[in-house]
Amino acid sequence: MTFFVSRYDNLVTAKYHYQRRIDMVRQRYQVVFAPEQAYGDGNDSALFDRLAHSTTTYDAVPENEHSLFVFSAIILVPDTAVEEVAGLLDTDPGEFVSHTEVIRMSPTGSDVLTPISRQA
């Protein structure tokens, strides 16, 4: 799951940028599921605050014009490449500050394995 902050009027550009990142991942790994839809999570969470104040464009636009959004993807990745793929999915910090959270699943998809914590 990739969490990112964007202005509402810049969401189409953010989606395009994320799909380019997915295409980069697709060149090396099997992308099973990567919809273009972004889930909007508002602007009143700790993660929003942490990411929003990291972007260079945040202060120029009123807070109510920003939101935390989430993209999800299912990608088949060997354990040795998890950090690499998460890094590829993180978006351009100058415009769309993001944090990709990795959730490892069992081959059947029914069990969550050891979560991998990454710094936001």
Image (cartoon, helix red, strand yellow):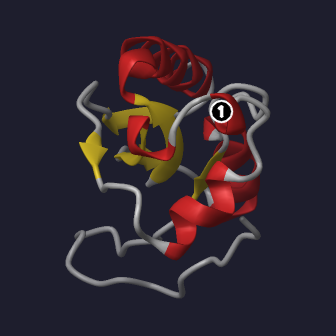
Residue at 37% across / 44% down in the picture?
Answer: 73
Q: Which residue is mark 1?
A: 91
Q: Helix or strand or loop: what does disc 1 sit on?
A: loop
The quarter holding residue 58 reads: top right
Given residues 3 and 79, the one toward you in this image is 3
Residue at 41% across / 35% down in the picture?
Answer: 65
Residue 101 in view here: no
Residue at 71% across / 70% down in the picture?
Answer: 118
Q: Position of residue 88 (x, y in %)?
A: 69, 35
Q: Quadrant of the C terminus?
A: bottom right
Q: Position of residue 72 (x, y in %)?
A: 35, 47
In the figure, 67 relative to 45: above or below? Answer: above
In the displayed structure image, the side of residue 94 where residue 102 appears, left or right = left
Q: Position of residue 52 (x, y in %)?
A: 63, 50
Q: Position of residue 103 (x, y in %)?
A: 46, 70
Which amino acid type is marked by label 1? Thr
Residue at 58% across / 23% down in the picture?
Answer: 21
How many C-alpha atoms fall within 10 Å of the one at disc 1: few (<14), some, or many (≥20)?
A: many
Q: Quadrant of the N terminus?
A: bottom left
In the figure, 77 relative to 112: above or below? Answer: above
Given residues 53 and 83, the one toward you in this image is 53
